[in-house]
Image (spheres, rainbow, N blue to C red):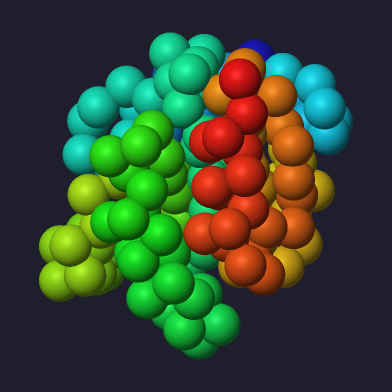
Amino acid sequence: MHLNSKLTRRLAAITIATCCALNRVAGADSSLQLGAAAQGKPLTMKFKAVDGQQVDLSKLQGKVVLIDFWATWCGPCVAELPKVKEAYEKLHPKGFEIVGVSFDKSKKDLQSFIAKEKMTWPQYFDGLYWDNIIGKKYGVEGIPAMWLVDKKGNLREMEARENLASRVEKLLSEN
């Protein structure tokens, strides 16, 4: 009986620890909702951003949205930032939005970086590095990766780094 109750307590402790760990990962954003990603099809993405705001791509219909998969520790990502910021400053008034998906481990480092760089768009953060939930779901194996969603909410491009501003302008000009 003693051995059995010890084993039962140990199993209960393991179960509780496992549930807590899973809740921390999933609970990084309990509002997280992701649909399939297929070019030409609607992209569903909902989450709570690092600054607390709710992000829902369906509420951005009528705008062109860049989904920017990146990290502060990624040299090529940081090198792309001036182009991204320039496109945003020029095209945001015309209906261009950006949603960042950060592969960072440290929330503090991410928050410091986005404040320093004046990145005003929302950022997804779960602290899971290459196991980032959104990145895993969408098969993102390298960053920076930039996707464009058109005004109807359809995923139009999954490789939008080259000539970003002109690609956005083209999508903004569509009815």
For the N terminus, which image quadrant? top right
Q: State the image coordinates of residue 54 (x, y, percent, origin top left).
A: 32, 22
Name the foreground residue: 49 vs 133.
Answer: 49
Q: State the image coordinates of residue 20 (x, y, percent, origin top left).
A: 46, 29
What is the total number of numbered labels drawn onto the structure image?
A: 0
Residue under the image location 74 percent in, 45 percent down:
157
Instruction: Name the side, left or right, on which 117 lies relative to 100.
Output: left
Instruction: Name the side, left or right, on which 143 lies relative to 13.
Output: right
The answer to whether residue 99 is seen in the rendering is yes
Instruction: Name the side, left or right, on which 119 lies relative to 63.
Output: left
Q: State the image coordinates of residue 167 (x, y, percent, origin top left).
A: 63, 53
Q: State the image coordinates of residue 12 (x, y, percent, origin top left).
A: 56, 21
Residue under the image location 72 percent in, 32 percent down:
155
Name the foreground residue: 114 vs 152.
Answer: 152
Residue under the image location 15 percent in, 71 percent down:
116
Above or below 93: residue 127: below
Name the foreground residue: 30 vs 87.
Answer: 87
For the C terminus, which image quadrant? top right
The answer to whether residue 8 is seen in the rendering is no
Above or below 104: residue 155: above
Residue under the image location 62 percent in, 29 percent down:
174
Above or below 174: residue 119: below
* The image quarter in which residue 50 lies: top left
